[in-house]
Amino acid sequence: MPQPEIYEEHLPGGVSFEMIKVEGGTFERGKEKQVVTVLDFYIGKFPVTQAVWTAILKENPSRFKGENHPVEQVNWKDIQVFLKKLYGFTGKKYHLPGEAQWEYAARGGRRSEGLQYAGSNKLKEVGWYGENSNGQTQSVGLKLPNELGICDMSGNVFEWCADYWHDGYDSAYGDGGGSWVAEENNHMRVVCGGSWVSISDDCRPSNRFVDITDHSNSSIGFRLSWHSTQEP
């Protein structure tokens, strides 16, 4: 099977980031074995780094400084500001991945081998978490990628998703795996992936958590997603 398509987006100051194409498909999630269909989309090879954030917004809110470390201490609302400014540089409407997109990509999409974590059954091979992180985030890409070539989807930082929080899986996803919205709980969003401070179970792609849109801390970052009827 050929490698997934990748494109590179160039930003001011010689900064760039890579996006990997995830071919659509179906997968089962939850104990209920809900079947979810996801359309083709692109997702960041890495969480958004401090270098990328700073290239766009000219400031770095992160606690653990490092150009190649994931940006953290950014809330859901901060990210919307970043995305709007990023559009001004790229002309592409990047966004947060929907929860279904995020999980499908973390599991390896069509290439999934049914692994416990994003790329391995051994978390230490693919992720930074409470037992090996030395109490902080680490540079992205130091651990093995998953089946799609995506890195750091288990551990390092939790990642914001576009979805409003919902307690169950019923009617949780829009058509094609898009984000789920609701009038209630509109200040609560889904976060996934586990972080540098997490226990191993939190880093499974199937696990999901909730946070409020104006909250930030050093264990939460994000990853870009993009889809279009035209190739980049």
Image (cartoon, helix red, strand yellow):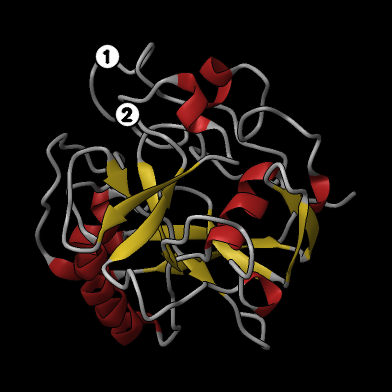
Taking the spot 67% from the left edge, 27% from the top edge, the residue there is: 116
Q: What residue type is labelled 2?
A: Gln
Most distant residue in the right direction: 1
* In front of the other: 91 or 223: 223
Please tell me how crowded label 2 is: few (under 14), some (14-19), or many (20+) other residues with Cα within 10 Å: many
Number of the front mark, 1 or 2: 1
Q: Are marks 1 and 2 in contact (CB under 8 Å)?
A: yes
Above or below, comparing residue 43 to residue 179 in the picture: above
Secondary structure at numbered mark 1? loop
Taking the spot 82% from the left edge, 52% from the top edge, the residue there is: 110
Query: Looking at the rendering, in which quadrant would you find the C terminus?
Result: bottom right
Disc 1 and disc 2: Cα gap in Å?
9 Å
User: Whole-percent x and y of residue 79?
Assistant: 26, 67
Secondary structure at numbered mark 2? loop
User: Whole-percent x and y of residue 177?
Assistant: 65, 69
Q: In the rendered picture of this protein, how many numbered marks are placed on residues? A: 2
* In front of the other: 94 or 10: 94
Q: What residue type is labelled 1?
A: Asn
Taking the spot 37% from the left edge, 81% from the top edge, the residue there is: 183
Image quarter for residue 86? bottom left
Please tell me how crowded label 1 is: few (under 14), some (14-19), or many (20+) other residues with Cα within 10 Å: few
| Left or right: residue 11 compared with residue 7 | left
Q: Label for residue 184?
A: none
Q: Please name the residue that numbered disc 2 is placed on.
A: 138
* In front of the other: 45 or 7: 45
Q: Label for residue 134?
A: 1
Above or below, comparing residue 82 to residue 4 in the picture: below
